Image: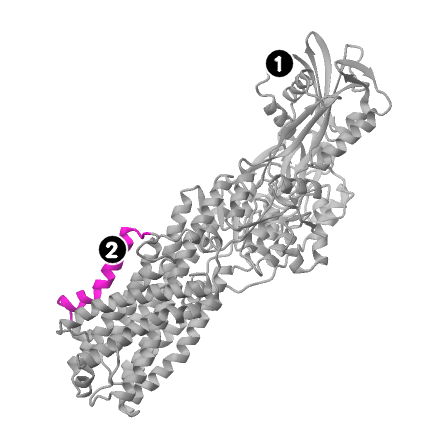
Amino acid sequence: MFKKKKDIDFIYDKTDYVNRIANTEFNNLEEVISSPIGLDNRIDNVNKFGTNTVVVKKFNWLKEFIGSLTELFNLLLLAIGTLELIIFLTLETGFITLVSALIIYFMVILAACVDFQQEYKAYKESIQLHHEIENEIYILTNRIVDINTLDNQKQNLVKIKQSELTIGDVIYLSPGDIVPTDCRIIKSNDLYMDQSTLNGETEYILKSINNTKERLLDLENILFAHTMVKQGNCYAVVINISVNNYSDSIGNTIEDMDDESDYERSLKKISQILIGFILIITPIIFVISWSTSGFAKNDFVDPLVFALSIAVALVPEALPAIISANLKLGSKVISKNKVIIKNLACIQNMGSVNVLTTDKTGTLTLNEFEVNNIVDYSFNQSDWLNTITSINAHASNMLNNKIDSAINNHFKDLKIKYELISTIDFSHENKLSGVIAKVNKQKLLIIKGSFEEVIKLISKVRNNNKVEDVKPGFVEKLNEFNNQQANLNNKILIVASKVVDSKDNSVSELVFEGFVGLEEKLKQDVIRIIKIFQNYGIDIKVLTGDNEKVSENLVKKIGLDVKKISGEQIVSVSEELIKSFNLFYELSPLDKAQIISILQKDNVVAFLGDGVNDAIGLKKADVGISVNDGSALAKQSADIIMLEKDLDVLEQAFIQGRKTFANAVKFVNITIASNLGLLITLLISSIWFSLTYKANDFIFLPMSPIQLLLQNLIFDFANLVFVLDSVDDNSIKSPSRWSTKSIIPFALWNGTVHVIVSCINFLIIGYGFKMFQQITNGNVETLHQFQTAFFIEVVITHIILIMVYRTSKFSLTGPKSNSLFNGLMLMFAFIPFLIILIDLPIHKMELEFIKNVFWYLTLLGLITLSFGLAELFKYSYIRINNKWI
């Protein structure tokens, strides 16, 4: 369950190798990669280098099961069970001692199997993600010794699976292709790549056969795995495969990262506290119980078995099963909202998340543009400008052009008639696109492009429907508007035109028509969802690789007051100051993970991302959230995968996480309070009975070892019902964390109810029914009746504590539990009576039917007292601490 925490440490050991390849001329490239370029015989290279397969660590069955078997609680129980088995084999004890040992072993194996099953399920899901349907890639089947021969090689292209690629393969890529592995370009044609999965930047990057850059991700002739071709095409030679790829190296780093969440850390601390209590109190009870016989050598076995049984009763050995059932129920509810839960444990963490860190592109935005402004030279709307802008975008033949798509969508209801004559495709060299079309019987050249490029081509301006020569101040006016829009992070394009004929259709001496303003499109309802998150007490922080202006404008648009810092600046400020920022821009993948690590010191952090550059952050966060169309590495690293990019789904996941967390915390707190109350009761009764009452032929124990184990089993099954319980409304209004500091005070205060009720029970049956006197006289039947009365009262009191402590409100008027929950609790309360009344070998359980009918009336009084005291102690605790569980 618990795994050792490791620091973030990612060093790509192929950096120098890739840089050397980037700066090597084609003629010397074969020497650097130790392979021919283009393979007419691939078998030799496959044998030498291997293939581009995904390497997944094998599931070590024995290691994982031993790990599950040797959890803290399990080790303690194994030691107790083994000791009881030794006692049975070496000393003359009853068959009950063997039964007790076997029950303990059964509990340990059951808990280990549940934990092991969860680990194996996670492994199988990882395998499934790794074996998603592969893309097929075109490769050349012949060797390339001269790049000029690549112009006539398409007839030599064949398709293979990307997992079959090896070093030296020459692949052909075109728009829409995902790069299958790290490659070096050997020929390109107007090639633009989307590297947002690596660096978070939305701008496409020009790639070519030459390189002038030094930084790894900026290398101009290197294509990295998982990036996408957006424009142009290329031939490239494979230089790395499998785990040697840059992105797959990140994946290897992720596998070795910390897998211990906030919930697991808290549970580990609680486990250590409980074990400490058990190891201290159990020997004390043994010594006190043994003292009743004057420490006679022949009488130490029963007190020892009794003390060991107490230890077993106090260990919440059913915790893994209960937590697992709770998580599975939560997972089932969340899955109805089109969410895949890869890691069940993260559902608990969802309930504690108070910081949501998120990437920008693809999570808050749609990675699309929308038109927000189209104005002419006078900054007014213009039908003419709308017409020619729509024609330009509609006639464009640029593949995957987000800008043209945005303009076409903006004018989807505009009906325009035109005759297309020719087009000028968009080029990143001059950053414009154009069409020649016949509009209203005029032959027009319509140009749309970047402000900086198109303004150089303008000689006239359309002003109030009149075409005029450009006057002084024209450029300054346009520059001022462009700067204003840039500060708002609006992307500005210029639309220009001119009448052309057969003699003149050059892209020059254009007429300025107006501006087109675009902004990155937010996801639907993102502002509303962000406000909902804030109302639920979740702080939003944006972590992005994008630039300052783009990122700042986005944060403003989603309604946050910007407090920003760059990736370069975070190394020079304190961790406390870092926690105060809500925008972190120009970040590397390691920067994101480091920021998450800093935030985790005081918070429970979720991270929402979908790119390769988000993978380390997804793994580092307490809850990693990705989307189904995110990169394979992001989905591999995430705990939760959303099948749809709908932030409403996240809201429901957080709410269900809080419900699941609330039930888990209720279970642990109430169980510890009840068990601690029982422990104190047994300690008090052991001292009381050892000092006051000494039987002649046996040791006076308040409850026999087998009864302790039996009530422990009843408790465990009753506690399983917690997963069906509803929760208080205030449990989902704000995030909650387990406070290991408050759990013992809570247990001591509220467990006192157990102590008071049991002591009153002792007084009534001991003195009122004169059982103490009969036990002192050696009456074994009376001893068993005394133990039975205590056994029944303990079980019923535990059920009452569950019903009262499950809500911070008055239990009779607070949130209603469902009928199944109530019915099961009632059933567990009657189990002790059923064991006694039906024909079972109860003598082996040392239970005796209580013949005095007045005790059953006393039991009704004790039940009423338990309820009243529990409500009183709960009310007092809330008044003092201003909170409940």
Nearer-N-terminus badge (2/1)? 1
Mark number, residue 823: 2
Q: Is residue 123 left or right of residue 691?
A: right
Residue drawn at x 62%, y 14% is 416
Q: Give, as a three-letter code, the residue at label 2.
A: Gly
Label 2 residue SS: helix
Pointer 1: residues within 10 angstroms few (<14), some, or many (20+)?
few
- Determine if residue 528 is in view: yes
Nearer to us in this view, 19 or 497 = 497
Residue 499 x/y as whole percent = 76, 12
- Tell which residue pokes out farthest to the right in this image: 472
Using the rendered view, name the quadrant where residue 812 is placed: bottom left
Q: Please give the range of residues in magenta.
A: 816-841
Using the rendered view, name the quadrant where residue 601 is placed: bottom right
Residue 19 x/y as whole percent = 73, 49
Label 2 to label 1: alpha-carbon separation: 70 Å
Tell me if residue 591 comes above or below residue 67 in the rendering.
Answer: above
Mark number, residue 416: 1
Residue 505 x/y as whole percent = 78, 15
